[in-house]
Image (cartoon, rainbow, N blue to C red):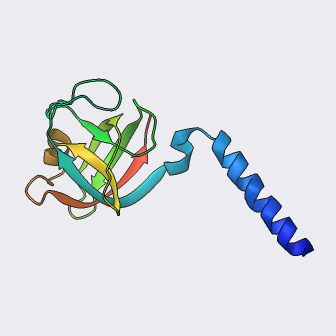
Amino acid sequence: MTNIRRSSFTIATIVALSACLPLSAHAASSCGGASWYALHSKTASGERMNPSLLTAAHKSLRFGTKLKVTNAKNGKSVVVRINDRGPFIRGRVLDLSKAAAQNIGMVRSGHGKVCYEIIG
């Protein structure tokens, strides 16, 4: 019983401490699926979506965070700024603007595997 209490305390402590970390600390770098979108609606940050800008959506990174995104298939990279929330499809880590997807050769396929790292 002592072990259960001790492990519960440890888990609760970890959860409490992780809640204090900035959002960007939870995902300093990652790999996963990405897709692109080209709407003209408002983004979660309040700005109008512009498909020709190098922007992206992420579930939790702070708005304004800059990422270097690399297409795992061809090695091409682009720097994007987070201005929206998403993607909302399991396994995907980013939704890129059409311009960002174009820069890394992902427009034709519509989606692909990417890796990203926070650069600012």
The part of the image, by quadrant, that contains residue 93 is bottom left
Residue at coordinates 35% horizontally, 41% vertically from top-left?
85
Which residue lies most toward the front here?
1
Q: Which quadrant does the N terminus fall into?
A: bottom right
Q: Residue at x 14, y 40 (%)?
A: 38
Quarter of the picture holding the C terminus: top left
Q: Is residue 94 left or right of residue 20?
A: left
Percent of width and height locating residue 50:
17, 30
- Numbered disc total: 0
The one of 31 and 87 positioned closer to us in this rendering: 87
Is residue 21 shown left or right of residue 55?
right
- The residue furthest left is 108
For the residue pair 79 and 7, the one nearer the viewer reads as 7
Q: Position of residue 92 (x, y in %)?
A: 32, 58
- Report whether 98 appears left or right of 22: left
Q: Residue at x 86, y 66 (%)?
A: 6
Please tell me whether residue 100 is drawn above or below residue 65 in the rendered image.
below
41 is higher (above) or lower (below) than 105: above
Residue 13: image location, x then y, percent: 77, 53
Rendered image quadrant of residue 22: top right
Q: Quadrant of residue 54?
A: top left
Find the residue positioned furthest to the right.
Answer: 2
* Whole-percent x, y for residue 30 in the image: 43, 56
Q: In screen coordinates, is 44 left or right of 71?
A: right
